[in-house]
Amino acid sequence: MDEQDSLRFLTLDWFLYDLSEESSETVASKEFPAGDLRDSLDGYIRHQKIQDSQIVQIDCSGEKSEVKSLQELKNIQETVIKYSQKPEKTSLGKLGSSWLVWGQLMSDEQSPVKLAQEICTQLQFEGTSPNWQVDLIAHGPLLGATLYELWCPPQAQGEGDSYHLLICLFESHWRKESLQKRVGTLLKHCQFLFLYRHKVVWAFQQSRGFRESLQQASGLVPQVTNQSLDRLEQSVVNLTELQDHLHQSLKVLASYAIPLNYLQEQRYTIEINLENYRDRVLKLAAEDSPKPEGEKVGGGQGQGSSLLFEKFSQFAENKYLRQIERDYSSLSPGLLLIENSIKAVESLNQIEQTRSDRRLNTTLTIASVGVATSAVVATVIVATPPPNRHHLEFQITTTLVSLILGAVMSVLVWGWLHWQRK
């Protein structure tokens, strides 16, 4: 075995994340039974629930031996993937997943950057392989090791090939007990850092879908506003058509307002998780400090690790947050246009409804006066019938007189009401 191409304690960890309200015990019994790996493999499966998220960590070092060649990493990855594949469909990993490769240098003569590059050639992710020249986003000292971060971001709504990989190579001088402590610290913080960054990326992917929905709905905005203007300019308004237009406008408003609200929610999600991410980076930086005398310091400085992990937060703030803010600023005026046009149509509808009700009341009043007059006249005439008058002739005359007087009174009432309105 070539010592220049080997590491002590070479280990691959896969962190899978998903949004879930189930307990970690429920997930373990359904999908990934926790505990040590089978088949004499060195590793374990661990579960943890953080707030609304589930984490499954699959840790594997392959066959139990202290020194391993980097060429064994491919088989180790295949083993890890095999343990994640279950007969039943698993939901874990939909939020995102991250890979962590760590190990200890055999000697100070080994080149961490060359080893990291070789590690990349051994790994194969779904649909893609690490590209050192393109995907390396950060590198620097951390916890007495050299860390390299590679990331291929997902495109659009999670489409395309993507992966996230950390390579952490500890210096050769660390004793096993100290190394275990440092690895424990690294794993503890990484599970939180990975969770927050995946939530940020996931929120941005969701925002692309809402943006697409808004762009489709925005095409209806000019149509709604123009139709509203046409209704307002009409001298004669059809109340039924006006109410139909109002109903359609409200549907467009809902199709626009809901995704716009969700778009703003994704912005808040990114802001909250970026804040959590930065807080966790500061906690890690506080632990990445020089050790007491008696141990050789590997050069890990809190400031260095803070800047190392700050690369992602800067990227997310400059690209993700600003993009959502621009989308919201450019698309939100459409909501105001729809709301204003609906308010105008509602006002016109209320005016027309009031006019219609007033006309109906006027008609009823006029009709009531006419009918009442006719009834009174008919009652008076019938009560005092003239002598020597034929009965049929009397009835016809009475009816005609009562109707004529009722009509006259209706005309007089209509004229009076018309004069009052003027």
Image (cartoon, rainbow, N blue to C red):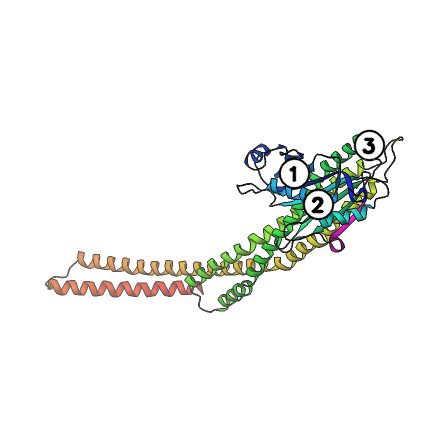
Residue 155: give x, y in percent of width and height.
Answer: 64, 55
Tell me which numbered mark, 3 or 2, is placed earlier along the sequence. Answer: 3
Residue name at image x 28 percent, y 65 percent: 407
Quadrant, the C terminus: bottom left
- Front residue (pair 100, 123): 123
Residue 282 visible in image: no
Magenta-colored stretch includes residue 136: yes
Magenta segment, which residues?
127-145
CA gap, disc 1 and disc 3 = 25 Å
**Which one is closest to the eye, mark 3 or mark 2?**
3
Which amino acid is tagged 1? Ile
Q: Secondary structure at mark 1?
A: strand
144 vs 406, left or right, is right
Residue extending furthest toward the right: 293
Residue name at image x 62 percent, y 45 percent: 95
Residue extending furthest toward the front: 1
Q: Secondary structure at mark 3?
A: loop
Label 2 near label 1: C-beta < 8 Å?
no
Residue 361: give x, y in percent of width and height.
Answer: 37, 58
Tell me which numbered mark, 1 or 2, is placed earlier along the sequence. Answer: 1
Q: State the mark number for residue 274.
A: 2
Residue 383: give x, y in percent of width and height.
Answer: 18, 56
Q: State the mark number for residue 58.
A: 1
Residue name at image x 79 percent, y 32 percent: 176
The crowding category of the residue bearing disc 2, from other C-alpha atoms within 10 Å (few below 14, some 14 to 19, many at least 20), is many
- Front residue (pair 330, 192): 192
